[in-house]
Every structure is written in C-alpha cells, then in structure tokens.
Image (tube, helix red, strand yellow):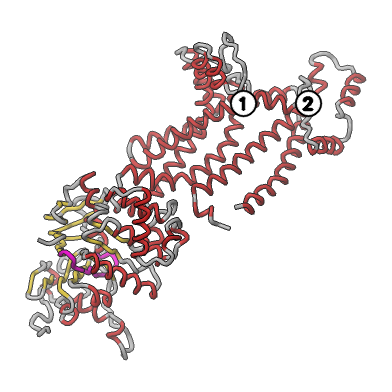
Amino acid sequence: MSLLDIRNLSVRFGAPDAIPVVDGLDLSVDKGEVLAIVGESGSGKSVTMMALMGLIDAPGIVRADSLRFDGHDMLTLKGRQRRKVVGKDLAMVFQDPMTALNPSYTVGFQIEEVLRQHLGIKGKAARVRALQLLERVEIPGAASRLDAYPHQLSGGMSQRVAIAMAIAAEPKLLIADEPTTALDVTIQAQIMDLLLDLQRSEGMGLVLITHDLAVVAETAQHVCVMYAGQAVEIGSVPTLFDAPTHPYTEALLKAIPEHSLGAERLATLPGIVPGRYDRPVGCLLSPRCPYAQPHCREQRPALEPHVRGAVRCFYPLNLTAEVA
Amino acid sequence: MLSFIARRLGLLIPTFFGVTLLTFALIRLIPGDPVEVMMGERRVDPEMHAEAMHRLGLDKPLPAQYLDYITKLAQGDLGESLRTREGVWEEFLTLFPATLELSLAALLFAGTLGVIAGVIAALKRGSLFDHGVMGVSLAGYSMPIFWWGLLLIMFFSVYLGWTPVSGRIDLLYDIEPKTGFMLIDTLLSEEEGAFKDALMHLILPAIVLGTIPLAVIARMTRSAMLEVLREDYIRTARAKGLSPARVVFVHGLRNALIPVLTVFGLQVGTLLAGAVLTETIFSWPGIGKWLIEAIGARDYPVVQNGILLIACLVILVNFVVDILYGLVNPRIRHQR
C-alpha cells in the first residue's frame, strides 16, 4: 500500500458548485519515493498539498473519494488526532522562506517547538537536538544561529531553518512547495541537493512542487503534470521526458531554453490557462493545443491509464514510441 | 540601543521648552489674575492689587516673568501654590497616586478587555460578535466622557444603588496613606470592608476613563490580528501541527501586539486628559481635579508646573513604550 493515496480530490472556493481549483486529482506516493508535481502558476499544485495538510480554510471546500496518508483518512481526521500526524509524519516546506518563519521568535525556539509538540523533547535535550538539526541542514556556525532571529538570516539560510523544522520530527513524507523559487540561482542548487540528500538518508517520501523540469529530470521517480487543476499526465522519469504523451507535457518540454539552442525564439505554448469565465466545454487545453480536433472542444477527456502511466487526452502522443 | 536612548533624550529638551512656553502663555491669556480671584466679589482696591501683584512678581513684563520662571525651574524649584502656600511638587506627590491608581485601573480594564475582544472579533470575523464589538467600540470612542460618566452614575449609583457616587472611599473609614494607593492602603489598614469600599469607588471612574482606550485597543487588536493571521508564518505554525490556541496566541498575538503596544502608549496621553474630566465628575482627589481648581483660581505656578509634570510623564511613558517595543519586536532591537 502506498504512503499517500489521493483519489478524485477536488478543491473549490465559495459555493459547492464553483469551478474547482483542483479537479478530480489522483496521486500516489510510495515510501521513500520522490514525486514531482509540475505545471504553471495557478494550476493547483500548491492547493492540492495544502488540502492534504488541512490548511484550506472556509470558504474552501475539499472533497475526495479518498485522501489517505499512512493509514489515516485525512479527510475525516480532526483536531488533536490530525495534529499528531501533521507536522510529525507529514511535513511541509513553503515557497518563501523569508516570510515562513515567525519574526518574533528565535530559530532555536521555532525548531524546539516541533520537538516538544511531537516528540516530547524539552529543555536542554531539545536544544541539543535543534543544534544537531541545524548542523544536519548544513548551516554554517550552527551553534551561534540557534539564538538568531529570522531577520538576521539570508533567504537560503532561512529555507535551511524551515527544512530543519520540517524534518525535526522525522516525517515519513515531506512536501516541498517550490522550495527554491524565492532564492538566488546559486543557492537553489544547494537547497535541492540538501533536500535530496535528506530524502535519501532518512528514506522519506518527497513531494516536490516545482516549475523546474531540469530538477524533475534529475531527482524524481514519478511526475504528475497539472494543468488548470487537473492532472493531465502521470508518468515516470525519464520515459516521460523522452516520450511525453500529453500535448501539454510536450509543450512544457519544448519550452526548456536548452531545447531551443540555435533557434531565433524560445518555443512557447500560445495562450493562457483558462480562467473562471472562459473555461472550455471540452478539453481544458483545447484552445491552446496544436493537435486539437473538433471532438476535443466538445468533450472533456478522462485520465486514462496506459502502458507507461496515465494521460488525459483523446489523442495521446508517442504511445507507440520505443522507450529504453 | 544606547544611542537610541540618547537621541530620544535629546528630543526631550525642545519639547520641554515648548511645554513651558505654552502653559506660561495660555494661563495668562485667560482674563483675570490670581489676586482678583482671591479678592473674590469684593471690589479690589487698585493700590492693594498693585502691591499684591508686585509681591508675586506679576507686575514685571512678560519676558522677564518667563525668565524668572525658567531660572527657578532650572534650579529645580517648582514654586508654591498661590492659594495654599504649599510647594507644587509636594502637592503633586500627594495627589498623583490617586490619579495613577485610577489610570492604572482604567488601563487594566481597557487593555485586558480590549485585547480579548479584539482577538475574538478577529477570529470570528464577520460574525455577530465581531459586528457587535466594532459597533460598540465606535460608540464608546465617540462618547463624550463627561456625559458617559454622568450616565453611568445615574444608572449604577442613583438608580441601582450599586456603587457610590463620588470620592475614593467612604468617610466612615480613616485610612492612613502609606502608599497613596487606596486599594493597597485599605488592605494594609485591616479595617473591615474598607478594601471593598475602595474598590467599589474605583470601578465606575475606571470604566469611564477606560472607555476610549478600550475602544481604540479593541479595534487595533482586531485589525492587527486579522493582518497577522494571514501571514505565511501562521500557515507554517499550523503545518507544524500546533494547537489552534498556540497558533493564535503564541504565534499570532505576539506579533499583533506590536502595533497595539504603540497605541497603548499613545493612549496614556488621552488617559491623563480624560482623567481631568473623570476626576471632576467623580470628585476624585487627583491631579486632574487639582489642575481644574488651579485654573479657576488662576494659580499660575500650579497650572504651569502641574502641566509640565504631566507632560514629562507622558513623554516618559512613551519613552518606556519605545523600549518595550524593542523587547517585543526583535527587528527593532537589532537596529544599530
């Protein structure tokens, strides 16, 4: 049984019949597996994980056939029982480290808080453990950083602290929501290396939400490509890169600058993600899809499994391609 | 931090001179002089009047009078009351504890109730409670103190008979002023019922004086809390699996209190201004009532130096609040 199993998840804001931000999403993550979720801004990547963490407040409405994590039904788990899972076995690192830490408390306090809450470690023992964690996330001069306030840290350093906080209770699944987007390019690679190193050494599952397909290619075992709140393609690395079956995945891969070397312009996918008022009747990608048929504009495709994964397209590409 | 304190202290000097100049000028702008008031209804003999004015040094040109005043002040001499012949400083010291007791009670009332109401209103945003608190606080803020005070006296003291109408304590009790705080002195005196009596005397004036600060603090806490609850670090705290109470109070309120504390400090000025009215309504023997009487008697030294002392107090409180601000907000503390 997989560690995380999401079936038909939908998230809406406002009325129960509002247009879903996440629509019929299926996902699963195994123990120690790295799953990447990619897609452009607003495609519902973060909202999916926020729903799992229970961070969607009214007027948000979360529905699913199944939202299971490590044997817990996260849909019905409430209050104290939920808080025994969230922050302990299931932890999350957010996008902007400069605002994710509480400015009024020291780094040490914020890490020790997790240790006290979930492991019952207090006082001197907690401080020792917090120091170990700071060393584990490779913060230089860790001992002197315990009493530092977030405003005294750089962005990269803050993200390391946020990671230390997230792994403090040794989670089984870590969700990293674009953990490097707000950071300098040079720091981005360091943070990614750190996350993967932690994932391997601790044997955690890792859900990596990202824009960066190069990172996905290097790190993930599985990929979920999202578009307008739906999973359009689920596949494994590297086959998805060699033979994308969904036109959107293909367009994303073409848009990687390295693939346009020597060309005058970068390859792009014209148009934008459909909004609330211009949602197509048929396939959500149909207005932008170079392969769209009349049929695509009238009917909405379902996510259908195939030999190498699953795809939400009436006319998938490369299905018969030979993949090593 | 030291240079910060030094800079703040440096700013005190011009403020200080401004206050002396203002009070000196304003009290002399009111028609009449101390001698006339003392003579009362009787016709004043011009010669006696001139002689008395000369004796008080009030016949000199105004700049010379101001210079006299400042020179004495520089020597630490606050002068004496024209009415009672008592030193202004001594009178201030005897009366101030009464005002301080009243103000502290008002602040305690406004601070606790204001923060609690503000937090609940923010958590239940848009609810009936929220609208109720905000409506009532707007009404409280707009309420003229003297009218509000009379209203409460009429309802609680006259109609219901729950609380006494005026003063600090019933005449039955003879309390030795050890600390000047009636609540503490009555406890020390071990006279039966005295503490309760003092408390009952304190409740209404404290509520009246605390009403405006209460309204301001409740509104400020609510808006600060709403802003803080939207912050990313609140989401982080929730993702850590902390209890809702811990998220709200440890991670939220601590940050929301920073702007509230500033408002709190600014309210001390409002509070002392309100104390003048409140003390007059409730015949509370504090510096507010003292100043009103001094103005009526054109008691120049008391008015000038009494107001100067209050101004210093307001400045001092704001100074302390600035330092507290640094304690609550580490980002200020570390600015060099």
Residue B97 numbered tag = 1
Q: How many angstroms separate mark 1 from mark 2 (CA)?
A: 20 Å
Residue matched to label 2? B80
Dividing the picture into quarters, in which one does residue A111 lie?
bottom left
Q: Main secondary structure of the magenta part?
A: loop
Quadrant location, the C terminus of chain A = bottom left
Q: Which residue is at 56% across, 29% downward?
A: B103
**Chain containing mark 1:** B
- Identified by mark 2, the residue type is Glu
Dividing the picture into quarters, in which one does residue B96 lie?
top right
Give the residues in magenta.
A30-43
> Which residue is nearer to you in this view: B264 or B317?
B317
> Which residue is nearer to you in this view: B288 or B172?
B172
Q: Is residue B295 visible?
A: no
Residue A255 spot, x, y in % from top left: 27, 80
Per the image, label 1 sits on a secondary structure element best described as helix
Q: Which residue is at 72% across, 39% downward?
A: B19
Question: Mark 1–mark 2 contact, CB under 8 Å?
Answer: no
Q: Earlier in the sequence, mark 1 or mark 2?
A: 2
Number of residues whose C-alpha sits closer than 10 Å to that of mark 2, classed few (under 14), some (14–19) or many (20 or more): some
Residue A10 spot, x, y in % from top left: 18, 57
Per the image, label 2 sits on a secondary structure element best described as loop
Residue A35 lies in the magenta-colored region = yes
Image position of A231 with respect to B213: above or below: below
**Chain containing mark 2:** B
Q: Which residue is at 60% across, 20% downward?
A: B284
Residue B205 spot, x, y in % from top left: 53, 23
Q: Is residue A320 visible?
A: yes
Dividing the picture into quarters, in which one does residue A78 lie?
top left
- Identified by mark 1, the residue type is Pro
Residue A44 spot, x, y in % from top left: 24, 63
Number of residues whose C-alpha sits closer than 10 Å to that of mark 1, classed few (under 14), some (14–19) or many (20 or more): some
